[in-house]
Image: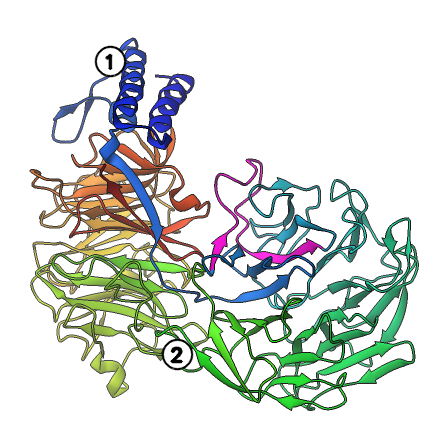
Amino acid sequence: MNFVDRKKARYLVNKVKSLRILPKAKLAYLGLAIATLFFVFFSKNLLTLTDNSGISSLPSEVALFTTTTNEVYEWKNVKIGGGGFVTGIVVHPTVPDIVYARTDVGGLYGWNSTNQSWRQLFQADNLPENIPYPPYSVESVAIAPSNPDLIYVATGAYTKSQDKLNPGYTLKSSDRGESWQLLNLSLPMGGNEHWRWTGERLAVDPHNQNIIYFASRLDGLWRSENGGETWNQIDPKMVPVGESHPDSEQKAGVTYVVFDPTSDTVNSQTQIIYAGVAGKGIYQTTDGGTSWKLLREFSSTDLVPQQGIVNNKGELFTTLYQRQKDSLGSVWKFTSTGWQDLTPETGKNYSAIAVDPHQPETIFVVTYPMTPNNIYRSEDGGTTWTTLKNTINKVSWYPDWCFYTLTGGIAISPFNSEEVWLTNGVGVWKTENSRDRQVKWAAVVNGIEEIVTFDGVSTPGGASLLTAIADFDGFRHDSLDAFPEKTHGREVFNTTTSITYSSGNPNFIVSVGASHHNFSQIRAGFSTNNGKTWQQFPSLEKGTHPNELIFGNVAVSATDVNNIVWQPTNWKPAYFTKDRGKTWQRIDWFTEGDLGGGAHTHLWNSQQILAADPVRGSTFYLYHHVKGRMLRSDNGGETWQIVNEMLPEGVWKGAKVNTAPGMAGEVWVSLKEKGLYRSGNFGEEFVKVANVDEAQVFGFGKAAPGVNHPTVFLEGKVAGESGVFRSTDLGKTWLRIADYPQGYLGDFNVLVGDLNVFGRVFLGTSGNGFIYGEPQTD
């Protein structure tokens, strides 16, 4: 069956799934689809596949496209709520309820006022096919004041030229994010770098939707006069590219562009525009961008303009950042009479700023980062300031400090002066009493799932999902459709890189992690009640924990919960304990020969290359990418041997090792573009699973009814088709259950099959939390 034939057959089957018709009519369509499928397939040469046990099966392409109405999958987000840095927010000045929030790794969200929730605007089915990579690190977003349907977005994670995500690119939507087109502006962007809270870097002329500016980090100021079709750089002699800063190797460049909506227009073009340039100053044009002049020169190259805004009197307000230590940031106003220093308090850096669209003397300003006493309000144009007294209504699992963290953006509703939006390092907040003595903020994060995932497990008879994530540790999900009550570590700022359980005692869970900002702050240990409460390893409590034993992967014996093996990160050798973490013994064998040390490369590598045999309690497996070796210990981690040297080598990023629940010696390895490998004899022999072209992530779930082995789930490519797949016969045949589940277009770091509900599968993303799917019945 060639690609065109498969595409025709798949189209008919998918059409049936999407039709809202009566059952009899749907069956008629289904019959036509299946008939077409079998006619196309059996008119070709029939190929018989054989697995490593010699069992023959039909070609996997038959199972790949065969489906029935009771196998339609429904996909949802596992509800977590926020969790990441929402770096900016924009509110449309003339049309109610148009609000967009940008994030550093989670994409772009649009506000739905009807159901009070956010919607991810970047989906697999609404982005152009020729985008260089998924646009989940948003550098800037801009609306067109004269056209509420227009959105412009600059996207790109890192400015480093050697990074695969370089250069960035720009997108345009003419229908409020329902569809997108790729524009002809490709520059290095840093949506996940230092200075990502500045801006907005994109700006649209309030009187002409075709005039757009982009303030870049490395290449100065750019302008389009035709809605983004073509762009020209403003002469760097007029608007320079900016200076470096001692706080970061990453440059801020030109940090914002703002129009003066009160200025004159010529040929429908706003004449007065401002731009902030790091280490240089504030620049102004009074002739619609033809010429620019330095309006205020900075006394120090350490000063970086953060955000700028112009009120309805034509006054420019700008915030400045100097240094992280010994801060001398400030707030300034420029009027027809010159510059005025409005700084509420010295010795701080300032970033987020907003002015009331209808009350130009009302200003809000926030320090960077935000602290309990550093949100200020002025009602007299900045002459005097009030420090806000804040109360918060937070998501239950948020730590107490959640409101006071990295500062993003702030915006006042043009339709209700009491309504103020604020973003920070955990999500979006809103108040509707911003003028009161005590301001009440509520977390408004329903629909925002900005979590980077590392690992997850499902335990038979216990929680369907326990997770390991960046920044906020992870959760025991008692409900998939409600926010969790608490993290594993209860307010510990922690990145957990691995979580596992003992097959013989599923209530015994182990996880390892630490603060990725301070490696000495480790939270690693075990739970004896299925993740409801946790205990630190005794070595951490006693201060005897090995310094290099951090992050990486962990596994626990199926028969002895005291026996744990831990492969730390940064190429360090593995350790084992037989007293539940009181003492740890370094496995020096890993540093001998040509292994060169441990198999886990660095913290942000989502690989899970260590596993315990699910039956034989003393047996552990580890894939080492050096020369593609499977290592095995048969005595609880004390000694190891190379049992197989035939696996593909060099796959270190995202490699996975899983053992099949209840099956002794059944160990599988996924190696990304090099496929999926299975061993039934304790790792001594591996066979590449037929027709699996790519295995990005995989895992095992509950067995199908009447089957005595677990279900296999895979995200990757089978028989030339990409998607998420399910196999109930250990990889002989595959059923595709999704193409892009929940519309997600980025990389999946984790796959977990539910061991309590047949067919349910969880996918962990690289910025949008966990997605889960399960078959629906009519």
Instruction: Bin the neighbour count of mark 2 within 10 Å (Cα to Cα): few under 14, some 14-19, many 20 and up.
Output: some
Tell me if I can see residue 158 in this picture.
Answer: no
Q: What amino acid is labelled 1 in the image?
A: Leu
Is residue 458 part of the magenta span, yes or no? Answer: no
Residue drawn at x 47%, y 74% as measured from the top left: 442
Is residue 134 part of the magenta span, yes or no? Answer: yes
Q: Where's residue 355, x and y in %?
A: 71, 74
Q: What amino acid is labelled 2 in the image?
A: Pro
Whether 80 is drawn above or below 687: the answer is: below
Residue identifier under label 2: 399
| Chain-order first, disc 1 or disc 2 | 1
Tell me if I can see residue 415 in this picture.
Answer: yes
Q: Where's residue 87, x and y in %?
A: 57, 66
Q: Where's residue 658, x and y in %?
A: 22, 50
Residue identifier under label 1: 46
Q: Secondary structure at mark 2?
A: loop
- Residue toward you, 359 or 119: 359
Q: Quadrant of the C terminus?
A: top left
Instruction: Bin the neighbour count of mark 1 within 10 Å (Cα to Cα): few under 14, some 14-19, many 20 and up.
Output: few
Q: Is residue 673 left or right of residue 125?
A: left
Q: Where's residue 20, x and y in %?
A: 36, 32
Q: Quadrant of the N terminus?
A: top left
> Distance from label 1 to label 2 (Cα)?
59 Å
What main secondary structure does the magenta stretch of the protein show? loop
Whether 73 is drawn above or below 455: the answer is: above
Range of magenta residues? 117-144
Q: Is residue 256 left or right of residue 137?
A: right
